[in-house]
Image (tube, rainbow, N blue to C red):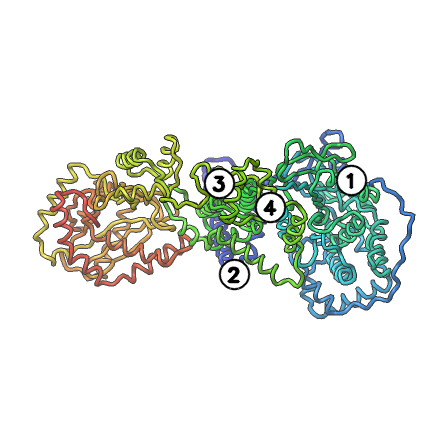
Amino acid sequence: MDRTEENRQEYKELQRRVKREVSKAKQKAYDELYTRLDTREGEKDLYRLARQRDRDGKDVQQVRVIKDRDGRVLTSEESVQRRWKEYFEELMNEENEREKRVEGVNSVEQKVDKIRKDEVRKVLKKMKSGKAVGPDDIPVEVWKCLGEAAVEFLTSLFNRVLESERMPEEWRSSVLVPIFKNKGDVQSCSNYRGIKLMSHTMKLWDRVVEARLRKVVEICEQQYGFMPRKSTTDAIFALRILMEQYRDGQRELHCVFVDLEKAYDRVPREELWYCMRKSGVAETYVRVVQDMYERSRTVVRCAVGQTEEFKVEVGLHQGSALSPFLFAIVMDQLSEEVRQESPWTMMFADDIVICSESREQVEENLERWRFALERRGMRVSRSKTEYMCVNEREGSGTVRLQGEAVKKVQEFKYLGSTVQSNGECGKEVKKRVQAGWNGWRKVPGVLCDRKISARIKGKVYRTVVRPAMLYGLETVSLRKRQESELEVAELKMLRFSLGVTRLDRIRNEYIRGTAHVGRLGDKVREARLRWFGHVQRRETSLDFIEYKRHLSTTSNSQTPNSTMAKTKELSKDTRNKIVDLHQAGKTESAIGKQLGVKKSTVGAIITKWKTYKTTDNLPRSGAPRKISPRGVKMITRTVSKNPRTTRGDLVNDLQRAGTKVTKATISNTLRRQGLKSCSARCVPLLKPVHVRARLKFAREHLDDPEEDWENVIWSDETKIELFGKNSTCRVWRRKNAELHPKNTIPTVKHGGGNIMLWGCFSAKGPGRLIRVKERMNGAMYREILSKNLLPSATALKMKRGWVFQHDNDPKHTTRATKEWLRKKHFKVLEWPSQSPDLNPIENLWRKLKIRVAQRQPQNITALEEICMEEWAKLPATVCKNLVATYRKHLTSVIANKGYITKY
């Protein structure tokens, strides 16, 4: 094609047309997507969309270069694949040193029952859909769709595997996918976790075998991990209640948190077979499990392709439903001779807690655990094993492991929940807030999408973000301040999601109601009661329910001074006896030992006797005022000068002056001074010229007959916010001072989720209402009038010579607009500027906004539809009454000498 000017223009025109069509197609696709997401059927796609958008925002999923063991960057595909294979092959085939077993164990030779259909049906129901498939590319959905035919086929297949003790060769292969841990160098293999994708049919076989093994193997009560009717919440509560009892009793408690290095990947398989036989597992099942691990192999799937296949000869299968229970069997047998009864030993899979009342004893127990585990191929991590002491005394020292000092900490993250040696939970609250934000950052592609409704956003928040914030809080005693921290973080997330800031002045209750999210404090209490109900309904009580009984029994054998339960108030005779012994010259320690009372309690009673010459409980005259008279004058003077001063600012002012109070105290103090926090009135900014014009208009039209006002079409624009009024401001004012200039705010429009409307009405009813979709200028305003003003007048059956009213907005008073109105022969009412209180349509807007707020629209589209529906429902009698009482507006302006009035 020749590069002529004509061809160039034709090319540009075609390019613009293509862009326009692509944009239309894209917009149509997005509209269909959001429409589907807002339905019950489309909510399943919502989480898939959130994960996809989260992945699209990260580039670590597509790392095509990696570093070798010496830190050199590998760029070629062959070298990268070779490095991935080298790393995982070494990881999954390295075995720790261990002693060879010389003792044998008797095998249990017994006939096992055939697998029944109900067993297959049960495990098939437990398998979740939508999971990544293994090398055979057969998802579990295939078996679920086939229904009863699949159950019969799988039952027959599993029985053949059980009888032959050989599973299909295809099940031995797996695919290993490295997943970045979100910490450390993205090009280092050690910062990736390998997730193994196995055949779904083999996973069903795993579950059948696991269900049968759980029926014949009894795991010790100290194991909480992957056990029925036990959870992380139980283990966390068990540890917290134990530490709390020792703090209350002012006794030392020593805890060591043991970590095992790559526990699942380092289990020797000979030890696994031995532990299974020792636990009483039938030899048939032992051979079946051996066959699962025999000749197992895998490949690594990375960004540059798949590596060569390699064998896996050490450790348990990652991703197998059977592996957690097999690991529990191994830990149960290896710790049989070293573990103590609860609460001194607790295990959750490979997370072990060893507790004792003395440092020497816990050090001895730790060494016994190390010897028992490391002689059988497991290894205790020297760097991650940590020690904590409750009620530590000076010079208590630390614990040593094979002569090496164990790291001593004041806090430890146990099963995801932070426990502190001082009993506080401030760090745990901060961790929960951080976990909530981490969860929120995983789904910002959905939560921050303005086109997704608030209801859907609320559901995503409740299912993705809130569980991370509530985790483990069933076991924590929250103070009001800490509960407030959690709620503040939650409201920040909700405001971010809904596109609302604190400057919009929208109440928290409306934010929660829009997103259908309840208060976090209520949800914490609800979760605590739900968990307690589960505990109460269990057939067998948990270990920690018996802890207090155990501890009280222990304390009875100690001296009375070490009683762990909280003591009741001493009797009057005992208090007087303490004073008598003190006057006799005995020390506080001797008095405490003699009477069985704590030394601190004895000292407090003696101090009280020295101060008041009595040991009786004296009545109080009432709590003293928190703020001095001078402080009251200071804050009163501050709010008088600046009524918009917040309670937080006043709290900070008093704190700088040396007085620490709460916001509630500020409110009560100012209320006693006659000042109340109220919403500021919205008033226009009046200049003297505006006041004179308003007064002139009111006087000229005061005596106009009501028929004249009935022949007027009133019009105006307004903005309706999706989340209610967003220009609210609160001020401190006295009664009947709402219109004082200091207590008002200007009637300006703020941005946000809203729509702009133009409407008109007369005494005969409402006219047309349209949405202004773009920024309005003079040309757009004239277009609106040309399409809607005359049809409204016709529909309202206005009389000849009707008058059109609009305010003096710049776009209304342009020369072109005036000329257009003159050519159309429209009679326009001369109107004073800055006079919304004189326009009765403002009252109609208020009624419309109340009706819309009651409907609670979820998005902009619904807001527009509701506005149109409610505007059409406005009764004509309301419009007629507004016009009939118009003379009152004029009378109020005259009485107020032209200044603003209530409207």
- To which residue does mark 1 refer? 367
State the CA–CA distance, disc 1 to disc 2: 57 Å
Q: Is residue 622 above or below residue 640?
A: below
Query: Mark 2 belongs to which amino acid?
Result: Arg
Give residue 11's mark. Answer: 3
Q: Quadrant location of residue 852?
A: bottom left
Q: Nearer the viewer, mark 1 or mark 2?
A: 1
Residue 898: % across, % down: 14, 43
Of pointers 1 and 4, the one earlier in the residue sequence: 4
Report if residue 656 is visible in the image.
yes
User: How many numbered marks does the figure carry?
Assistant: 4
Q: CA distance from mark 4 to mark 2?
A: 46 Å
Which residue shows up at 86% across the image and 49% down it?
Answer: 270
Residue 244 badge: 4
**Element carrying mark 1:** helix
Q: Is residue 177 visible?
A: no
| Type of amino acid at the residue the image marks with label 3 | Tyr
Mark 4 or mark 3, earlier in chain: 3
Percent position of residue 344, x then y: 70, 47
User: Badges 4 and 2: C-beta atoms under 8 Å apart?
Assistant: no
Give the structural element (helix, strand or loop) at label 2: loop
Q: Say which residue label 2 marks.
A: 40
Q: Residues within 10 Å of mark 1 (few under 14, many from 20)?
A: some
